[in-house]
Image (cartoon, rainbow, N blue to C red):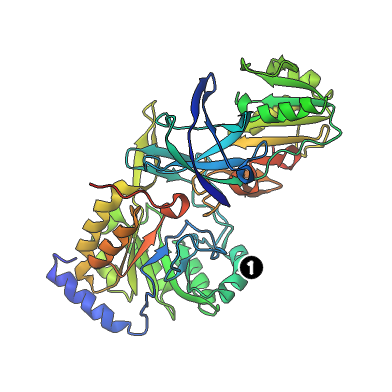
Amino acid sequence: MAEAICDILEISLSDEGLSAQFDIPARMAPAPGQYLLGCSLSGVDVLPVALYLTGAVDNRLELCGDIPAHWTPGEKIWLRGPAGKGFHLPAQARRVALIALSGRVSRLRPLSRQAVARQAVVSLFSEYLPAALPAEVEAMPLQALTDAWNWADYAAIEAESAQIDQLGRLLGLERPARPVVPAEILISSRFACAGAGECGLCAVKTGGRYRLCCKDGPVFDLYSLDF
Amino acid sequence: MNDSRKDDSVVEESSLSAPGCTLEFSSPWMNSAGTLGFAPPAQWPLPVPPAAFVTNPISYRPRKPAQDRALQTFPGGFLLHTGVPSPGFREVIRQYAPRWARSATPIWIHLLGDTPVHLDRMARQIEDMDGVTAIELSFAHHTGGAEILEMLRSVTGELPVVLAVPLDRVRESWMPQAAASGLAAISLAAPRGVVATDTGRGIHGRLFGPALLPQVHTALEYLQGCGLPVIAGGGVTRQFEIDRLIAAGAACVQLDFVLWRGWLPVRSD
């Protein structure tokens, strides 16, 4: 895993929480859904936090996640990564559904840009609609998802592990889940060991066995999950 | 223990009773169980290799992750509640025994306290495995002294046995008897605690963090008279703290979450 010490260039506050801008070496840039581990060099952070790509400004990358409130511009952050498996937007996808079940739209934003750049029609389904959304992205309430589910030819979902059953009910994915729309899910979970210790904090059940979001995810094939 | 002459005499006898079960520490550090998985990593997180690699806790039957898993920080550390998941003894052996056999670093198998029958089965099978040089035993937080002593009897055999004792349990009345039961060493493990959420609900789990270090030194001091090597553990976040614990009498130091996050910076205070 590559590592670098980077200054926080800017901190922004949105409805979803804090995001931070860094000038990160290109080899460490996370793909949509992948994460970096970030830890303040001051020693205040007992554990590193997972940071997800949410945007890019000039050469700077904007990262979101559970950014500690004490992080300030100018602070040196020890970054490691990228880690985990990210989203795989199919090249042929033309109707893309983004579903932010826990409201963390920022973790799906880079994917929306990728899809728009490929001339795809993109719809976002969320209870919380962010202000900074590309103009090409149509925002829809979560309730509209059931009707729109068969419209999409690819879906990217963000949810907490506790919401997996809710998602299954919402999409009618009764066991065994049959692939209808190619779909991937980013499971937002807190990491303790980030895979080093297989501590099990971020475990999720897939195909009858437990896998770890930090190591085997955080992006999984939706239909591999046990609903 | 160092404040009880009676306990000291018991312990002295025990160290004579198990002359073959000695441990050697070629390095001042090793990982604590649960920090680096079930097999040694391709690359150690520190430049100096450890004295041993300690596996994640292994139970006889598979253990699922807890439903109410939690990570809760507090000033000076964090509480972790995972349910200590394990694929079960058979599966761990199937997956990892070949890697243990190839390991240049001695392997300590960490067994999670279970019924004496299960512990006996696991311990006897481990004794025949290449690369394995010791058994470390831990027990569930609700386990009483009599049960722990029974567990120790079950695992005792050809391999040295190390008992992992949470920092908050080193002074319990059964400890002198445990120390006298043929143990090769005592390792200090993460204590349990409760962190309250905003709603007042208490989250129970194991505690980690620099705030524990004074307790580690206290436990180490207390156990000095037990006649057994004591492996300090918990709360070590800066490299120099290893030297201080060794100077204070620890035979070795087990590192935990610092292997995940890296050393904390050294402050001038």
Q: Quadrant of residue B181?
A: bottom left
* A164 to the left or right of B64: right
Q: Position of residue A79 (x, y in %)?
A: 51, 44
* Amino acid found under the numbered disc labelled 1: Arg
Front one among A137 and A183: A137
Q: Position of residue A22 (x, y in %)?
A: 54, 34
Q: Position of residue A96 (x, y in %)?
A: 79, 26
* A152 to the left or right of A194: right
Q: Position of residue A75 (x, y in %)?
A: 42, 35
Front one among B195 and B77: B77
Q: Image height check: is B216 above or below B122?
A: above
Q: Dot 1 corresponds to which residue? A: B94
Q: Image height check: is B219 above or below B94?
A: above
Query: Quick one: which residue is furthest to the right in this view?
Result: A92
Q: Chain of mark 1?
A: B
Is residue B171 visible to us here? Answer: no
- Disc 1 secondary structure class: helix
What number of labels is visible?
A: 1
Query: Quick one: which residue is furthest to the front in this view?
Result: A58
Q: Image height check: is A104 above or below B252?
A: above
* A150 to the left or right of A102: right
Q: Quadrant of residue A154?
A: top right
